[in-house]
Image: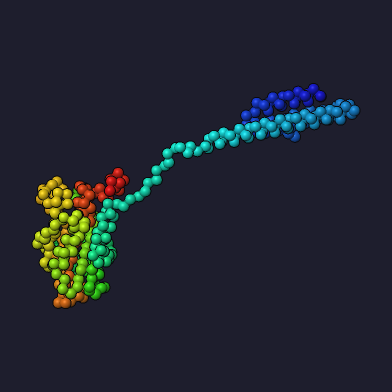
């Protein structure tokens, strides 16, 4: 029995030495020292030996158990240490590695243009007004003195939601909403989305942006309109910019004019941007039609006003040299990042 115990100890020790994981060690512990393990099996034979011999063999058995336990503990510690070392090795941080770039957003060229426009007009004493994108036919056309047969009312030009409700085709209805609610003096700009039933191409988008301006007070003249637009053009396009008025027709203004500015690229000499003319078409404007003032409860005998409207997308395209309006709405970061 004594030799069987010794043999067991040796066998266990050599197995423990070879173990390379905690799992294998746990298995060895159960195999040798467990309730149904090898040591128990041997000790079951105790009854067969001399009673006088039993205490001595018992002591040997205890020593064998202790030795195996010690070996197991030692091996366990060694493996745990090694596993920790491996983990630390895997988790080391290389502080010399370059960091991950954090993308910081930037303002879209249209947002930048709108912010510039607001700055310019607010500095001239204008307030920013807002109106709904879903409008009624009354505010978009009727109140603005558009004749019943005006072509812009057509389904092929305007998105109708029903007979009376449309997506606004211009920011001009904001004029009416402001004049209905506010007594003169009025000085507002309104910026926002407009919609027209256009097929997208390089210069058309069914959704685009406009800025509308309106000033109403006693004694407002075309001179005020000209002065205001000149200050705007010099601030927006550059201090040497000149503007000129061309007679035009809008239902809501009388007289009406389209305004051109000298090309900011060539200064008026003629280049690719202005297609050789030296001028860029910038906006529509005029003196508010007496019918419009009356529709809003303002007496045209006492008050007069001017108004203007511009396409913000076109302004941005002119200023930043963008040749296709669709680029503004595709949200391609490679494009937007350039501005
Ligand atoms: N609403 C016009 C358009 O969409 C632009 C415009 C022209 C606005 C003259 C005005 C104005 O306020 O006076 O084409």
Residue 4, relative to residue 123: is it above or below? above
Q: Quadrant of the N terminus?
A: top right
295 or 248: which is nearer to us?
248
Q: Examine the rendering and report whether any part of residue 189 can be seen.
A: no
Figure quadrant of residue 133: bottom left
Task: Please name the residue shown 63% across and 35% down the image.
Answer: 80
Q: Which quarter of the picture shows residue 193?
A: bottom left
As displayed, is residue 301 above or below residue 91? below
126 relative to 320, above or below = below
Horizontal and vertical percent position of residue 56? 85, 28
Q: How many marks?
A: 0
- Camera sees residue 110: yes
What x and y, as percent, mark residue 52?
A: 90, 28
Q: Could you tell me which residue is drawn at 47 percent across and 39 percent down?
A: 95
Measuring from the top left, give residue 112's x and y in whole percent: 28, 54
Q: Position of residue 161 (x, y in %)?
A: 26, 61
Colour setting: rainbow
Q: Is residue 81 above or below residue 264?
A: above
Residue at (22% x, 63% y) in the render = 212
User: For this rendering, which residue is in front, 128 or 69?
Assistant: 128
In terms of image quadrants, where is residue 12?
A: top right
């Amino acid at each position: 029995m004594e030799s069987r115990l010794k043999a067991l100890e040796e066998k266990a020790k050599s197995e423990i030495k070879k173990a390379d994981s905690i799992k294998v060690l746990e298995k060895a512990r159960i195999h040798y020292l467990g309730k149904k393990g090898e040591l128990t099996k041997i000790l079951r034979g105790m009854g067969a030996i001399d009673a006088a011999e039993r205490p001595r063999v018992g002591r040997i058995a205890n020593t064998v158990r202790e030795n195996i336990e010690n070996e197991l503990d030692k091996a366990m510690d060694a493996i745990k240490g090694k596993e920790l070392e491996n983990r630390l090795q895997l988790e080391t941080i290389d502080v010399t590695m370059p960091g991950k770039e954090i993308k910081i957003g930037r303002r879209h060229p249209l947002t930048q243009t709108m912010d510039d426009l607001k700055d310019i007009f607010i500095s001239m004493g204008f307030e920013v007004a807002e109106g709904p994108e879903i409008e009624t036919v009354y505010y978009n056309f009727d109140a603005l003195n558009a004749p019943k047969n005006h072509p812009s009312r057509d389904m092929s030009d305007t998105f109708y939601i029903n007979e009376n409700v449309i997506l606004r085709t211009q920011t001009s209805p904001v004029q009416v909403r402001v004049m209905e609610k506010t007594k003169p003096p009025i000085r507002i700009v309104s910026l926002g989305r407009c919609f027209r039933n256009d097929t997208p191409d390089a210069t058309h988008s069914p959704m685009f942006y406009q800025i509308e301006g309106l000033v109403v007070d006693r004694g407002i003249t075309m001179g005020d309109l000209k002065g205001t637009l000149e200050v705007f053009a010099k601030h927006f396009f550059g201090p040497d910019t000149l503007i000129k008025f061309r007679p035009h027709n809008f239902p809501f203004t009388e007289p009406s004019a389209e305004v051109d500015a000298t090309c900011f690229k060539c200064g008026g000499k003629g280049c690719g941007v202005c297609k050789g003319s030296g001028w860029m078409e910038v906006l529509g404007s005029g003196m508010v039609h007496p019918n419009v003032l009356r529709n809003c409860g303002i007496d045209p005998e006492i008050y007069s006003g001017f108004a203007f409207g511009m396409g913000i997308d076109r302004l941005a395209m002119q200023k930043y040299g963008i040749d296709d309006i669709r680029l503004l709405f595709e949200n391609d970061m490679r494009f937007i990042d350039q501005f």
